[in-house]
Amino acid sequence: MKRITAWLPDRVDGRTRVIAWVYLAAQILLVTTGGAVRLTGSGLGCPTWPRCTADSFVNTPAMGIHGVIEFGNRMLGGVLAVLAIAAFLAVVKLFRSRGDLFWISLVAGLGVPLQAVIGGVTVLTGLTWWVVGIHFVISIVLVALTTVFVVRVHAVTGRRVAAVPGWYAALAYVTSVVVVLTIAMGIVTTGAGPHAGDQNTPRSGLNPEILEHVHAIPAYVTFGLTILLVAGSFRFGGAPLRRFTRLMLAIELVQIAVGLIQADTGLPEILVGIHMTLAATLAAVMTAVIMALTAPAPAAEVEADSAADVVSV
């Protein structure tokens, strides 16, 4: 036990940063593989949970490709559990000096088994569209949390101050709300569309064509707000904010193009899968933009605060 404890990092180092990035990539990949399960009609490839069949925890040859795809997605969930433990162990000794990393890794880690349970509920309820929607929402939340973890392991420790004017910060927060609304409308739209995950799964009964247009409204509002964020970042923001807002704009341009093409071509599976992956990536970059609204306090301010603390004592 002492050897294991001694091996654990006592500071944020290269191991921690690599784990953080792999953790985030795996969370986004889970959205991609989850989409593949649904888009290939493999949602019930493993017809029960937690076993894949009544007698086996793994898929069997008789289940064909659908069993392989569904079980593969479950296996990625297991990989995520390992990464969650690794991320927690990488910062557990930093509880006093970097409590932010400790709590973020703990909450994100607890979200992994929660996600697995909700995934099981989707199977046991026959892929009910709103349960599948909750499953996707949790994935987006975990993507956001692991993005925060990535940003924090690269951040300078110490007090942070606002790096942008109040109106710009408010604009960024409003944009994040619209991004959430866009993703939520995408879930509702998908729940009415043809890709149910299984041919016998009922849909929501709503009109998918109308929902496609409703979904597009917050998407275009997000795009407009992002243009303002990019423009403002060149005057008020630092390099990270400029980089993240431009990346966000690029993702939205691709997302809009994919959305228009898939709507005009009958929602081909590959494009819908790309659309889902881009949504998760957009959530990650939007989170990074919010994180970039603050910056380390100038050294002079930190020294002044330290001096004031000494005088007060």
Image (tube, rainbow, N blue to C red):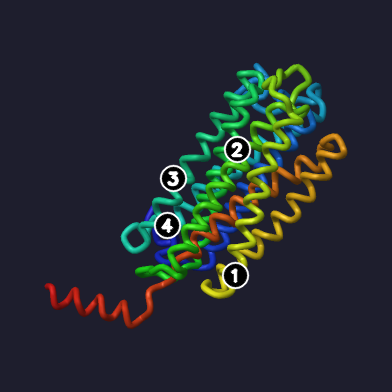
Q: Is disc 1 placed on a helix, strand or loop?
A: helix
Q: Is disc 2 placed on a helix, strand or loop?
A: helix
Q: Is disc 3 placed on a helix, strand or loop?
A: helix
User: Which of these two is toward me, 34 or 255?
Assistant: 255
Q: Earlier in the sequence, mark 2 or mark 1?
A: 2
The residue furthest left is 313
Q: Which mark is residue 242?
A: 1
Q: Amino acid at mark 4?
A: Leu
Q: Which mark is residue 101?
A: 4
Say if 114 sits above or below 105 in the image. above
The answer to whether one can see residue 190 in this image is yes
Residue 84 on image: x %, y %: 51, 47
Residue drawn 50% across and 34% down? 114
Q: Earlier in the sequence, mark 4 or mark 3?
A: 4
Residue 172 on image: x %, y %: 52, 58
Q: Amino acid at mark 1?
A: Arg
Residue at image mark 3:
107
Q: Earlier in the sequence, mark 4 or mark 2?
A: 4
Q: Which mark is residue 184?
A: 2
